[in-house]
Amino acid sequence: MSRRTRPLATRIARTTVPTLAGLAATMLVAVASAAAQQPAPSPSAPPRPAFENLRFREDWSRAPQGDAFDPLKHIALADSGAVWLSLGGHVRARAERAENFLGGGTGVRTDNFGLVRAQLHADLHVGSNLRLFVEGRQALAQNRDLPGGNRAIDRNDLDWGNAFAEVSGTVLGRSAVLRFGRQELSMGRERILSPLDWANVRRIFQGATLEARQGAFTVGAFVTRPVTLLPTAADVPDVHTLFWGTTIAWQRPGQATLVEGAVLVKATDAAGATPFAQRTTLTSRIVLPLEGTPLTAELEGGAQVGASGNTAVRAFMFASDLTWSRREGWAPALTVGYDWSSGTSLGDVPQSSTWDQLYPLAHAYAGYADVLGRRNLVEERIVAQVSPTAALRLRLAAHAFQRAHLSDAVYDVTGAVLRASVVGASGDIGGEFDATAQWRWGRHLRVDGGVARFTPGQFMRDTGAALPYTWMFLSVTTTF
């Protein structure tokens, strides 16, 4: 039996598990030791900031109490307290298994592999108006033999993540923050703009961002270039792509109702036979609890206009969720959702009306197996979640996928063509069932695991290999 086709138990025992288990065990011991030593918080201690997806949004300006890692969160560097430093980071180890990757085909399609990443940041504050935030990161991939091998999002050898200078103050009566340098960007539910935490190497941009607040309103603007990931060399800004825009959001403190919108522009220089292209995306989102009921509605829509060479571009998307939830008991939640993103009709220039998903958190949408991107896609889904204990959250999801336009292709999670359309092919792409669990031990340790199974529909059978695709994962994350 070849190495590539060894059973899961044999192959993981010899490669992935020793590395990941050793790291996971080290993290468990460290966190357990910290938990055992943590002092009791003072009754007058300030509220503890939560760990954020964008770590630079955490506010450790007041020294916390009650945790063994607290000495790292606010280190006074001047007697006046005006200069202080905060340290933080995380380590995540993940094992994955794929069976009949993306429905089968040439090359290795069944494989086990491991991913490990570590990030450490230093947040220096000088007075109340100047800040320097620097984050280093290391990402490793082990034995990924699937098509594409170790991808750029899997490996990053000792490079920078967030690395920016920040100036804050008051402008025209509004609190404002200006950041310049490398930084992560995120918007709303991350359907369009996300740091892509699921990847082993998070997405980063380089440029300037401005954010101003007054009352319930937050207004932002940014001018950036996406950073190109180079696994074994220093990452560099993509000098051929400019991404800029403005955002606005309204939400009163303590309320769930939210209204937000954005204008985003992505322009890419001509390269060889590829023409200059520019798309302007107008998007809005609303989250609305239905008064007197346990229901919350979420609606998000977008339109894109622009040009690719001499071809005009027009594309659209719509996403919706209706969630029923309760806090008591097992905190059950049930969500029914419908998404639609446009494709291109027969006779039009290819992709001229196909939605450009930009920079999304792809893994969170269209199924955990990461088969499909949100382009020329219709998705119906139902998601159920419960928490049998405060530390454990269980999730089940079922998805059905179709093509929005039968003359357009099916696209993968990166937005590239997965299967080209053929005349007379079905619109049925397939379905997926996901089952995942998340367990948290205190503030610092999280274990995630799950399985997803994608069943190809008639379109996949019409256009190539169409075996059921099963994906499994187990990850351990520690954060401080």
Image: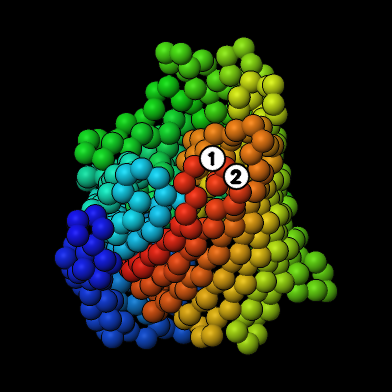
Place of residue 350 in the rendered image (x, y in percent of width and height, measured from the top left): 60, 24
Tell me which residue sits at (27%, 49%) in the image.
Answer: 145
What is the crowding at mark 1: few (fewer than 14 residues within 10 Å), some, or many (at least 20)? some
Question: How is the rendered protein coloured?
Answer: rainbow
User: In terms of secondary structure, where does tag 2 sit?
Assistant: helix
Q: Nearer the viewer, residue 168 or 366?
A: 366
Q: Nearer the viewer, residue 405 or 208?
A: 405
Tell me which residue sits at (53%, 40%) in the image.
Answer: 463
Specify whether 222 is left or right of 22: right
Q: Nearer the viewer, residue 314 or 119?
A: 314
Place of residue 228 in the rendered image (x, y in percent of width and height, measured from the top left): 36, 34
Query: Can see residue 331?
Result: yes
What is the crowding at mark 2: few (fewer than 14 residues within 10 Å), some, or many (at least 20)? many
Specify whether 321 is left or right of 269: right
The amino acid type of the residue labelled 2 equals: Phe
**Label at residue 463:** 1
Between the residue at mark 2 and the residue at mark 1, the CA separation in whole angstroms equals 6 Å
Tell me which residue sits at (64%, 39%) in the image.
Answer: 425
The amino acid type of the residue labelled 1 equals: Thr
Residue holding disc 2: 459
Query: Can see residue 306?
Result: no
Place of residue 468 in the rendered image (x, y in percent of width and height, measured from the top left): 48, 58
